[in-house]
Structures are given as C-alpha cells and as structure tokens.
Image (spheres, rainbow, N blue to C red):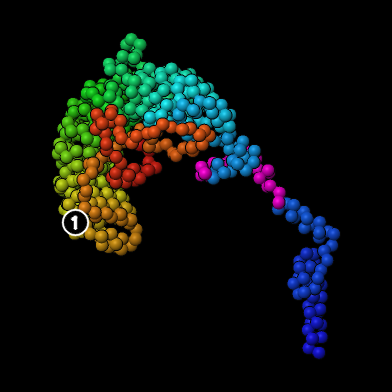
Amino acid sequence: MGQSASKKSSKSLSCSCSSSSSGLRARFASVSVGQPAAMTKEELASCEDSTAYSSRDCTVDLPDECLALVFQSLGSADRKQCSLVCQRWLTIDGQNRHRISLDARAGLQDAVPGIFARFDAVTKLALKSERRAESIGDEALALIAARCPNLTRLKLRSCRAITDAGMAAVAEQCSVLRKLSVGSCTFGFKGIEAVVRGCSVLEELSIKRLRGLPFAIGASTSGDEIIGSASLRSLCLKELIHGLCFAPLIFGSSNLKTLKLNRCSGDWDWILEDIADKVLGITEVHLEKLQVSDRGLASLSSCVNLEILHLVKTPECTDISLTAIAERCHLLRKIHIDGWKTNRVGDEGLIAIAKQCPNLQELVLISVNPTVRSLGHIASNCQNLERLAICSSDTFGDAEISCIASKCMALKKLCIKGCPVSDQGMEALAKGCPKLVKVKVKKCQGVTPEFAGWLMACKEGMVAVNLDTAAPTEQAEPSVTESGALENNEQSIDRIGAVNLHSSSCSSRPSPWKAQMGLFAGKNFVVSAIRRWSHGSSNSSHT
C-alpha cells in the first residue's frame, strides 16, 4: 500500500510540473522526477540551432581592425600562437605587427622577401648580429629599407658588414625615420651624415662604438660645410675614440635638446664652449668619463634652459663650474653627480645649487661628501625635492639623515648606500618626511634588519622599505651610467623566429678596444633604483 502511494505521489508531482511549466524547462522538470519526455519537432529544431550557434566561429563577425586591437594587447608568445589559428589571423597579425627584431647574420638576406611579405607594416625594426658572426651587408640592408618605407625607428647592432653605402640606402628609402641607434658597426661619418641629410624628421640619434670614424674633425664633410639637422632633438655619443668628429653635427643642430657624451676620447672643453653659443635651447646634458674641465662645464651656464645635468666621473670639474651653472640655470630639476672620490665637488657647489635652483626635484650624489651645512640649505630651499640618493659618502651620517628627515617635506623616495648611518639616525624618518613612500638602504652596516619592520610599522604600512645590510665586497664603484636614448627608452621588441641561422663560436672575453678604454662598469643598485623612480617622467621635451 505504501508502494502504491509512492507511485501516486510521483505521478501527481510530474503532472503538476508539466502543467505549471512550458517548453524545454517543463520537459527537463518531468525528466528530473523520473518520467521520460519526448521532445517536439519545434523543441528539437531549437536545440539544433543552439548547438550550431555555439560551435560557430563568432570571430568571423569581428572586423579586422577589432581583431588587430586584440592581438596588440597580447604578449609576444601568445600573439605568435594566435597567428597559427587560421590564415585570416595570420594575415591580420602580419599586417598589424609594427615592431620586430631580426637576427642580422648573413643568412637573413635570403629570407628578407618572405619576412616582409608577411610583415608589411613594420615601423620599428632592430637588426642584431653576433659579435663574431658575419652580418648582413649593404645589399640586404637596402632590400630591407625598400620593403619598409614607413620605418620610423631603426636599431643596428654588430652589423659590421654594413658600409656607408648601406646607410645611404636607408636614408634614400626611409625618409620618415625618426630614431636611429647604431652600435658596434664599422661604417663611418659619411653613413651618419647621409641619414642626417636624407631623413628630414630625424629626432633621436644614438651612436655607440662606431669604428669607421675619421681621425680629424670634419674630415668627412664636404669642405667647410657644417652638417646639421633642424629636427634633431637628442644626440648620444658613447664609447667613441674619435667622437670629436661629430662636433659639426652638434653645432649644426640648433634645436637640439638632449646631449649625452659618454666615454668619448679627446678634449671636449672647446666643444662645450661652442655649444653654449650655438645650441642655446639645450635642456639636458650628460657628461660621463669625459675629458672636460671647469672651463668647459662653466660655459654651459649660458644654456639658461638647462633642466637636467648628469656629471659622472669627470675629475677635473669642481665646485667652481657647478656654482657657475647654478647661478644662471635656475630651471634645473634633476642633478646627478658622481665625484669619483676626488672630493672636488662638495658643500660649496651644493649650497650654490640649493640657493639658485628652487625647482630641484631629484638629486643623486655618488662618491660626494656633503655635510649638514649643504644638506640643510638643500632641504630648506628646494621644497620640491622628491627623490634623493646618497651613495658611497664618508660624511653622510646620522646628523645628515636627521636634517633631511626634519626639513624635506616633499621627499617621496630615498636611497642610501654605503654610508655611515645607523638605526638611531634612521629613526628620524619615522617622524619626518610625511610624503615618504619608498626607502632603500644598502651596505650601511650601522642599520639593522629590525629597522625595516619598525619603520613600516611607524608609517602604518605606507612606506616600502628595501634593506640590504650585507658588508661591502670588492667591486666596481657605483656609477650613474646612461646608455643611448633608444636603448633605454625603447619598449621590448617582438622577436620573429623567421630564419634559423647558425653563428660561429662567440667568445665572452671583452674586445681589445674595450680593454684599451677600461670600460667595465655595469649597472648597479643605484642606477636601477633611480631609473625606476624616474620612470614615466620625460627627461626632455620634444616638439
């Protein structure tokens, strides 16, 4: 009797579900209580349509432009995988890939037609060969240039088979080129001159370890004509034995804003003197391991629009030239000084900066010995100071850090390395610097690991503390090194594995030229910290 009641209950439940619902929902409800249900023709057709729609490729409805935007937001690896899905995706990816990097060994020449048939919209190109491998030559470069008429950025690395003729082909075919970076190549001044003359919108030029330069200044120019570019905004010369031959280019570029001279041989005093007379609009100057004295540096005081000054390991420059610049260049925002332990830049120069440069936002002092006397003036007068780094200083101790903490109200980021500070002095940061968000302390043996947690607790977690109290080890002295404009600022470039090229064996030992010049300084803690701090802010204005 109980079984019959159960059956009646089941039947009544299924009937109630069937009567209270309609369509597929009612059918599924009846099946759930154990009663089989047959689908009508209309319901079956609806299910078939739904299945067909779910298996349909909905991306065919997307315009090519929308699909291209999706691809551009993907990483390089994901983008390569997507290009293998179908012929349409492969085509769209190729047509919208604007930035590629290619292995520039000699075998690339045979693959150029196929590569640029697929990637026909390239505007940013990097060609990099192995140091001891045979690179592409003029013929291959001319072929690439002809395929990339809209090229705006070009980077050449270790392309030793390229001559002045190859660069002339680039100048002829790529007239809209805006940025050129060359390194470890063997063509000479005429190749650079061809690009400067042929590319009327060239804005940034970076030249590193160019081997085919003449010994005499202006030896490659036609007569007394001074080459130059009205569009050139940034020029970086790095590790050039005969870099002085580019003096006519500097003088002829009247709209130059940024000049970086790094480890170039020769006496640069007279060059800087002429720059002050001929390139008055310059706003950023980097001088590193350069033969320049107070005479040359002081002449830059005529560049009253100067905003950024990097003075790195120039032992002949003293407080005298720094004071001269401060007295006239009141717009200075960023100053980096590496005194190289010579003690020729100290309190006097820093006090002049403090009194004359109220807009100072970033100050980096390496191997310089400031005291409370100069730091007090900086903290009091430079109310906009946001980033401060003191490294390898024998005089920056507890009194100095207390001075900074009590007076630098706008300070946001502080870096201290290899200085005689202790926990007692660092405690002042807990009460001062209300806008502080980041502190880095390295190789300061008087600061204990407990300090990091204590400071974060005092600031209620609003300050990030990076602490490394390891004892100093023998290594190269810290330096604020600056590489070429395109090397630092350019985003990562997609590498296209289009050709399988085999290189000759490559030794890891430095080249004889590097050994001669003694260029073994590398990136370090201070460099990475300051660059990260300054990320996002423009170092120079471009028009």
Q: Is residue 332 among the parts visible in the rendering?
A: no
Assign a secondary structure to mark 1. loop
Q: Which residue sits furthest front?
A: 505
Relative depth, front residue between 189 and 102: 102
Residue at 81%, 82% (x, y): give it.
Answer: 8
Secondary structure mostly seen in magenta is helix
Q: Is residue 232 left or right of residue 421?
A: right
Count of numbered tags: 1
Residue 227 lies in the magenta-colored region: no
Is 337 above or below relative to 461? above
Examine the image and state in which quarter residue 362 appears.
top left
Examine the image and state in which quarter residue 136 appears.
top left
Q: Is residue 154 left or right of residue 110?
A: left
Where's the C terminus, which quadrant? Answer: top left
Residue to which mark 1 is pinned: 446
Q: Residues within 10 Å of mark 1 (few under 14, many from 20)?
A: some
Q: Which residues are magenta?
A: 55-77
Q: Which residue sits furthest bottom?
A: 1
Q: Amino acid at mark 1?
A: Gly
Residue 66 lies in the magenta-colored region: yes
Q: Is residue 290 among the parts visible in the rendering?
A: yes
Residue at 35%, 45% (x, y): give it.
Answer: 532
Residue 316: % across, % down: 17, 31
Relative depth, front residue between 517 and 377: 517
Residue 439: % across, % down: 29, 53
Residue 115: % across, % down: 55, 30
Examine the image and state in which quarter residue 30 appears.
bottom right
Residue at 52%, 33% (x, y): give it.
Answer: 499
Residue 497: % across, % down: 51, 36
